[in-house]
Image (cartoon, rainbow, N blue to C red):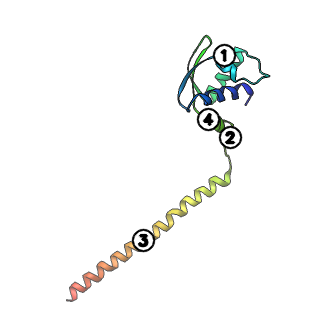
Amino acid sequence: MDGISSAVLNKLYALGDPGRCFVLSEEDFFEAFPEDCPHDGEQLKKAIEKLAAEGYIDVKYSGGNMYCAALLRTPEAAEEPEDEGFDEDFYGAESEKTKHVSAFWGAFAGGALGSAIICLVWLLLNLC
């Protein structure tokens, strides 16, 4: 992620919680830009459009040099790569399956024990 996009995300994150809309001018975003980045409105507009297309922010409206935008994900989540690990998914699915095996056998044993008690009570009532 380039410096301008990171600055836009950090500016919105500094203002408040994700999902909350803020009205900002270009100058507000320029304050968060790194020192070596030029304060160009076209680059800012491209960065905002890119972040909106990627799902990081939601732009309600933009006109002139004003933007109404909401942060959808925190910058930490934006910089964190998505896990594509097979091992986590595979072992996670197996552990979910094995959790229910013990519950099955416990229910089976309880049903068998309950049936045995009912049969014994019925047998005792018929013999007496």
Three-letter amino acid code at disc 3?
A: Phe
**In the picture, which quadrant includes the C terminus?**
bottom left
Q: Nearer the viewer, mark 2 or mark 3?
A: 2
Q: Which mark is residue 74?
A: 4
Q: Secondary structure at mark 3?
A: helix
Residue count near mark 1 (Cα–Cα under 10 Å), binned few <14, some 14–19, many ≥20: few
| Residue at mark 2 to residue at mark 1: CA–CA distance | 28 Å
Three-letter amino acid code at disc 2?
A: Glu
Q: To which residue does mark 2 refer?
A: 80
Going by the picture, which residue comes out furthest to the top?
64
Question: Picture coordinates of residue 106 (x, y %)?
Answer: 44, 70
Q: Secondary structure at mark 2?
A: loop
- Between discs 2 and 3, the one toward the N terminus: 2
Q: To which residue does mark 3 refer?
A: 108
| Residue at mark 3 to residue at mark 1: CA–CA distance | 68 Å
- The answer to whether 83 is drawn above or below residue 119 in the figure is above
Question: Picture coordinates of residue 72 (x, y %)?
Answer: 57, 32
Left or right relative to 40: residue 98: left
| Residue at mark 3 to residue at mark 4: CA–CA distance | 47 Å
